[in-house]
Amino acid sequence: MKKINNIGIIVAIAAALTVFSGCSDQFLQDKRNYGNFGEEIYDTYIGAQTRVNTLYNYLLPSSTGSIAWNTVSAGTGDINAKSTEEYGGFSDYVNPNVILDNKNVPDYIFQEFGSTNNKSPYGHIRECNMVIEGLRNSSLEEAEKKELLGQALFFRAWAYFRLVRTYGGVPLIKFPQNPIIGDGAGPGLVEPRSTTKEAIDFICGDLQMAADYLPARWTKSAQDFGRITSGAALALQGRARLLYASPLFNRADNKDSWKLAYESNKASIAKLQEGGFGLDNLESPGVNGAGWAKMFSTYASKEAVFVTLYNNVKTGTGTNYNKNNGWENSIRPINTGGSGGKGTTAQMVDMFPMADGKKPYDANSKYLYDPQRFFLNRDPRFYRTFAFPGVEWKFSGTPANQAEHPEQFPYVGANYVLWSYAWYEKLENQTKDNQAGYGADGLGANNKSVYIRKRTDDMAVSESPLYLYDNGESNRAFQYSGAPYMEIRYAEVLLNFAEAACGVEKYQEAVDALKLIRQRVGYTGDCGLDEDLITNRAKLFSAILYERQIELAYEGKRFDDMRRWLLWDGGEGQENLKSTWKVTGFNGNTCNYLGVQPLNNQRRTGIEIQVADKVGQAEEKDGKDPIISKGIMRPAAINLMKDIMIAKKEEETPKPNTAVDNLADFYREYLYRKDIRVDGSLEYTISFKPQYYFIGFKTNMQANNITLNQTIGWPDAQNGNADGTYDPLAE
């Protein structure tokens, strides 16, 4: 019998009638949970749309999410990111003192009853299946039905994709199951694992259907910004095909897999261009990559292929649709009213290209890299990814205690400068790599020295920030931010295409895509790319992965790239798990093939910029800044909107000093870079185990589905903890 909650349906329809006036607040209102209805809801477009909007509510990624069953890694210091070069601190995946098994492995599938989260991935997949079945059985007009079905199919594919890239094949539940044993669907409640190929093909089939049903651009583009398009569906399909073509699954370098990835990503670019998507500010890169930076604080960026919308509606204002982006608050230093900021690693700082596009220490670069003055002559994206002592980082607001406590909050937002150097109270600690000093300008023990700046809503770039600065909230002044989060942006699609094109040996197409990425930040000519990329497949693959590290830094993509390419060890020892897992393509070792050092057996370090010995130290930990107390004048701060970050060479004829030269001289005279420990004791190095490339099931997952075979390399709870038998590479 069909049942309808009449009051609920009236409320849902009323809400739907008021949405999409071009404001993300209203779009978010429409994504509240309208899930408790009968089948009749699908017989009206407005009613059916509320059910589709429920999927957005459940399945859109979070801008500050840590990798878990219900969200993707988004650039925070989570277990994934701390397994890469982006953050220090051993995660359980790389901690040499931790061995993961089926009892302590992270669980990205099973959802315990009574958890604060209301659904596991399969709960969300069930929701998708219910919406898909309801729409297919509805009396909607065909065009309306397809438009809504396309969105539901996308989200089912998105939920499955997140599982498959972690586990390989998983049970594929394609219809709403009936939990009542004895009903017609009862015997089908227990579903075994699919092969990985079956899962990828199913995901890509859903996405192809979604692309066929959805528009390239919604007619009411402002009102419907953020809704899934046909280009978004094909972009996710391209990402899935690229995953399956990569060495993780394609150990023999099979060209058929690369061909599918190439065709899918090429189609996605064509469809996105048809819908008006592309690289933001390609024709106007601005100074120091300002055009590139601006897209992260723009409401309707044409780069936003798959995007989560936020608003700056405050909690406790009589609304239940406030949804704030916490990223800005998380990266702002403590003396701005932010939560304290995020520190980077020395490896990331030293990795970015020089201003001519060449890597640091490349003999062909016209710039000599100076790690002590690391900010000189770098790729424009460097200055929009990191903040360092002596650079402006303006914001719209004034800390509440700025006037009363200028030592803690020295600046109003419009004048903010990051002076994050440090000093010590004990000289013997100054050179120790396990000791950190006390930061200037009220940063104190919370000092990060070199901060992650990526995706900031910088007032100098955007005069109308998307956050509501609340100086009444200690350390949470930026929490009410409406900046969108782009899970898939056009630049990634271009890079996916470049990698797939390289896979099928269409080298010029791959190089052309790389050039576009670099032209958008101001490169010209050959964009600093080596001439032999169009003849050297391995070197081109390596250049593409390097570009991904730079372009997509702190966007939650690096861990997946490292998994896809087996970059902790190059695939060494895979044949010990199963003989057929041996890497036979890519010269038998992906790291050697690419010419990169495996991350295993390395250590990451942080950077501290400290006061030089000649200046002296404060007499106590929180004593007066020794630079200020000695009467040393700090130079004018770098204004990234006008100061070109190219310094004069030491041997050049003296010329009028620029702000950049002055800052470089100040560093040379009064500051010193010290690399500090972030990976604990010196006796330990990164150790990512061969079996971790495919995560095994935790015991509770197998207990709830006795047909689930454990993955090879992991203890099988159904078989006395013997080695698992499921092969993610078997077709």
Image (cartoon, helix red, strand yellow):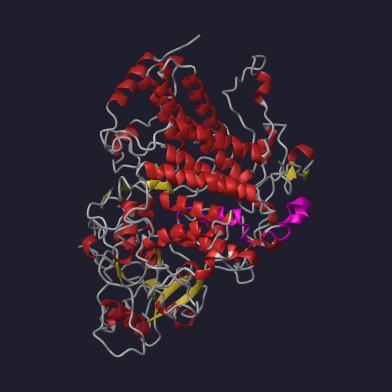
Residue 531, horizontal then vertical, whole percent: 50, 70
Residue 602, horizontal then vertical, whole percent: 60, 68
Residue under the image location 52 percent in, 75 percent down:
433
Relative depth, front residue between 673 and 562: 562
Residue 34, horizontal then vertical, whole percent: 40, 25
Q: Residue furthest left?
A: 403
- Would you place residue 457 above or below residue 529 in this image? above
- Would you place residue 385 above or below residue 5 in this image? below
Q: Magenta stretch containing residue 583, yes or no?
A: yes
Q: Is residue 457 left or right of residue 365?
A: left
Relative depth, front residue between 344 and 195: 195
Residue under the image location 67 percent in, 23 percent down:
188
- Would you place residue 271 above or below residue 628 in this image? above
Residue 277, horizontal then vertical, whole percent: 37, 46
Specify start and end residues of the magenta stretch as a single range: 555-584
Q: Magenta stretch containing residue 127, yes or no?
A: no
| Quarter of the image that includes the C terminus | top right
Q: Is residue 70 visible?
A: yes
Q: Quadrant of residue 14?
A: top left
- Would you place residue 463 above or below residue 194 in this image? below
